[in-house]
Amino acid sequence: MADPLIGMTFSFDPAPVQDDAPRGGLGSQVLPVAELDDDFEGEPGDGMEYLFLVRREASTHPSINRVPNPYQAPDETEEELLARAAPREVPSNRPDESWRIAYLKQFEALRERMEAAPPLDTFPRPTHDPLPPLRDCNAWKTFINGKRVRRAAPPPPPPSEPTLAEAKAALLASLSLDEPSSDTATAPTAAPPPTLDEPEAPPQGDEEYSHLPHLPTPYLLLSLDQHTSITVLGHISDWLVERIEEYEQVKSYVPSTIFAPPSLRHRKKGQAAAPPPAAPPKPTTPLPPLPLPTPHESQWILSLLLRLDSLLTGEDISTLRTLVKTILEVLNLPEEEDERRGKGGLGLNGERGGKEVIAEEKAMAWMIVAAVTEVWGQKDLWNENV
């Protein structure tokens, strides 16, 4: 059987459009419309006449209607525009532009060396403990910082037992017996009864590591993938948030005043009110150290940043931004508070205090901020809380 399409011609020209065919706003006409004069007045007799009146009225209105925006912000005045355009004063504790440029070159060079590192087989065999579970925040904290326990004090030496003769003499002395005659055998001299003194408190032992801290060695860093590095950075950010909360509680601690003296709790009828208490003096108690990352933790943070790619997902960038914002929250504390800080002792982060350690922690914290803001294009964080 022959193909019926053989010998037929096809035309791909668009179909002619009738100019007199009314068209709707969203497509061609579907319902019939009556053809009446433009000056038709009166009530429509059927649906076709009603559609004609609707089309005639719609043709008198614009196709686009603009209404005022009720949420539009008012226009700024010239003074406000100048104040917003003026450069804001950068705090003096922030590193300058020249330091950022020099540091960025060194950090990028170190990242290139890390990417060109030889295989793991060329490094010495690892001596660290097995890696903790990825989501276990406390286990990673112990793995990085170690765990300190108080060393048990050595037990006191056992008391020496008295000899038989000493015990017999002590017993006779306690009974107050008459001394034996001189012609009898002389008993050994009575020794004083042993004194039962209270045992002294055992000396308080020093702290020692039950789990040693781990350094970010090249082998350990190369064995971590990018997902693990980002997760550990998120754990460190959570540790810093906990320290900030503890720091705020210690700094804002106020002794309870519920135990007021009787003169303030009870007042006789007609007795004049007691004068208001004087303003409390300015606190002189030294503040705890700043809840910044310790130098050991900062070394870990910078080492983990070396393992990240230049292009990260939005979730990974959010983790880095949260870490930097947490550090900036501590770095932006008022400078006058530093005068009240202690000069030594253990702080909330387990490190010794002092101006030198605080300066070192601040310097390494700015290195972390500069690395994230410059390498991963988060420069808006420099103006955070300016």
Image (cartoon, rainbow, N blue to C red):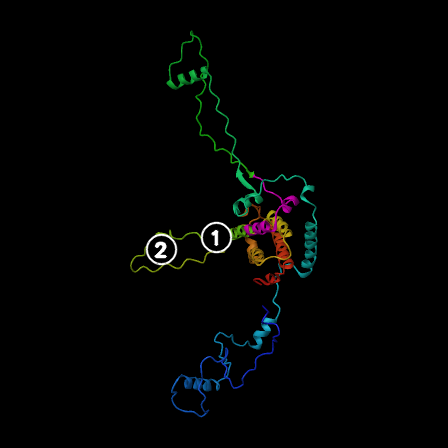
The residue drawn where x is 34% and y is 52% is: 262
Frontmost residue, 19 versus 257: 19
Q: Secondary structure at mark 2?
A: helix
The residue drawn where x is 65% and y is 58% is: 375
Q: Which residue is mark 1?
A: 249
Identify the magenta region. 211-235
Q: Position of residue 74 (x, y in %)?
A: 52, 76
- How far is disc 2 from disc 1 in space, using C-alphas? 29 Å
Q: Residue furthest bottom?
A: 39
The residue drawn where x is 68% and y is 50% is: 114
Q: Is residue 6 above or below residue 48?
A: above
Q: Secondary structure at mark 1?
A: helix
Looking at the image, do the residues carrying marks 2 and 1 touch, with CB atoms under 8 Å apart?
no
Q: Of the residues tagged 2 and 1, which is closer to the observer?
A: 1
Q: Is residue 293 visible?
A: no
Q: Main secondary structure of the magenta part?
A: helix
Q: Residue furthest front?
A: 1
Q: Position of residue 1 (x, y in %)?
A: 58, 68
Q: Residue furthest top?
A: 183
Q: Amino acid at mark 2?
A: Leu
Q: Which mark is residue 264?
A: 2
Q: Quadrant of the C terminus?
A: bottom right
Q: Position of residue 196 (x, y in %)?
A: 43, 26
Frontmost residue, 40 versus 199: 40
Who comes first in sequence, dot 2 or dot 1? 1
Q: Position of residue 290 (x, y in %)?
A: 56, 52
The residue drawn where x is 65% and y is 39% is: 125
Q: Would residue 320 be counted in the magenta stretch?
A: no
Q: How many marks?
A: 2
Frontmost residue, 206 versus 244: 244
